Image: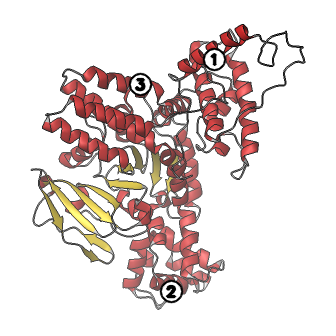
Amino acid sequence: MIATAAEPVTDDVIADTEELLRTSRIVYQGDREATALIDQLEVRLHEPLRLALAGIVKAGKSTLLNALLGERIAATDTAECTRIVTWYRYSSTPVITVHLRDGRTERMPIRRDQGLLVFDLGGRTAEDIDWIDVGWPLDGLESLILIDTPGIASLSGDTSARTARFLTPEDSPSAADAVVYLMRHLHGSDVRFLEAFRDTAAGAAQSVCAVAVLSRTDEIGSGRIDSLLSARRVAARYERDGALSALALGVVPVAGLLAEGARTLRESEFIALRTLAGLERDERERLLVSADRFTRPSDATGLSVTVREELLARFGIFGVRLATAIIRGGVTTSSELSDALVQQSGLIELQQFVLNQFQPRADTLKARGVVLQLQALVQRSPRPGTDRIRAGIERFTASAHVLRELALLAEERAHGLPLDEADATDAARILGAAGVTASARLALPADASPADIGERAFAEIDRWRALAASPLVERNTATVYQAVLRTLAGIVSELGLARALRPAAHIEPASGPGDGAGHDAGQQSQSDKRGLRRKKRLKWFPFGAQRDPLG
């Protein structure tokens, strides 16, 4: 059954999950372990979306995390703390808490060295620590919890195991809601991890909640100015790769070192880069021919070897070349250079992807994690009353339209939708392939008016209803049609739109009381009863899209 677009949408996933948690608390009353888990799940439901950064060793996770934060906090060397799962969340004052393997927690002193946090583990090793929780007063952490994980495919099996236990545990759902997965090239270990995360995090819906990042993209073009153009071509090829296309919603090339350097650019660094840009062309090109040549003693510039080494460490040879080119192009201030470098780094595209694909779906992604944990609890510790919890889980799975959208998008990327090419492209867009705002789904300008959105939405509803009405439609095709129609119904309901009724034919009513449309009282009563029955049935089919938390 498919609801009409003018009918109300009720899909408050947070409220429904809260009710499921209350039921679980009653059922497991007296069970300390289960009650403690339910307490944790309630916190998870109301905290920001958990976005983990994962990838093989030296893929650039901590560097990218610093770029996303806009502050050099995460350690990027091979120190002990890079082998520990570290959470970064918003706090009004800086605070670092170490969670030990034995269950105890301790506060860590806050020290910084050249901007980076210094994690004083108090003589402990990574094996003694479960995870580190960093609270920091950054605006970007108010809507996201960023989680830095140790590299997979590490020579140290224990280091890789920490990430596996956290993101892809064998006996429980993933602790992350979505993943940014960094890779330098596509390896078998990358595919295996993404497969494990999909299977662990998705549950029955088999949705995909990962974006792949082609990291260290400046190295793809050997540090040339056009390196990012080469990286974008490689990323596009990976997006079409059969192994990767079903495991990630997109592939975004990012020069993480450039992005970090740009977001944290210091005035002294701008002055040094401006000095390099002012050199004669031949001298500048000889100096920038390679990283080794750039850091040799030279009379071509007054910049010391130490200053040049610091520039190389902060921006890489690609970043230094690009920065000097941008300055020669007319940039005159450090803030202008910072903005230009960020734009070139690919960081904006990644941030926009997270904003378009993960943030608007945050409520459902968080609720999914809670529901899967409850499902594991019921399987692990059945007791009288758990049937009520199972029923709530089944209702969530049946009504979580956002997860079905993600599942269909993954199917579209892996195998294509069972529609002709043009319809498949339109269906993927409506399901959120280009973003989940109404204008993005309907291929309208971002500033489209509600009236324009409503007109296009109703036209699309008519179009997809006509396709779905064919008696020759196969079952898997009908599933796509129903999902598309439910998304469209959610759009018009979210905007509070209703389609005007067609004027009734001019018919002289029969004598006696009627409803103004030629129905006598008996006919009107039967019609009203059918309408009431239909409304009751529709309560089991909530046709709602998630409310955009940023709107």
Q: Is residue 23 above or below residue 126?
A: above
Q: Quadrant of residue 261?
A: bottom left
| Residue tagged 1 | 531
Q: Which residue is rendered at x = 58% and y = 82% of the image?
A: 333
The mark tally for this picture is 3
Front: mark 3 or 1: 1
What kind of residue is marked 3? Arg
Give me the residue at 69% from left, 24% from top: 464
At label 2, counting other C-alpha atoms closer than 10 Å, the crowd grade (few under 14, some 14-19, many 20 or more) is: few
Q: Earlier in the sequence, mark 3 or mark 1?
A: 3
Q: Secondary structure at mark 3?
A: helix
Amino acid on which the number 2 mark rests in the picture: Ile
Displayed quadrant of residue 170: top left
Identify residue type, mark 1: Gly
Relative to 221, residue 515 above or below: above
Residue 524 drawn above or below residue 381 = above
* Residue 527 coordinates in the image, percent (x, y): 68, 13
Q: Residue at x 55, y 33 (%)?
A: 544
Which is nearer the eye, 418 or 374?
Answer: 374
Disc 1 is placed on an element classified as helix
Q: Mark 3 — residue?
A: 395
Residue picked out by circle 2: 271
241 versus 108 height, above or below: above
How far from the left and from the top, in percent, is residue 511? 84, 9
Q: How is the image coloured?
A: secondary structure
- The residue drawn where x is 59% and y is 28% is 486
Q: Does label 2 or label 1 sit earlier along the sequence? A: 2
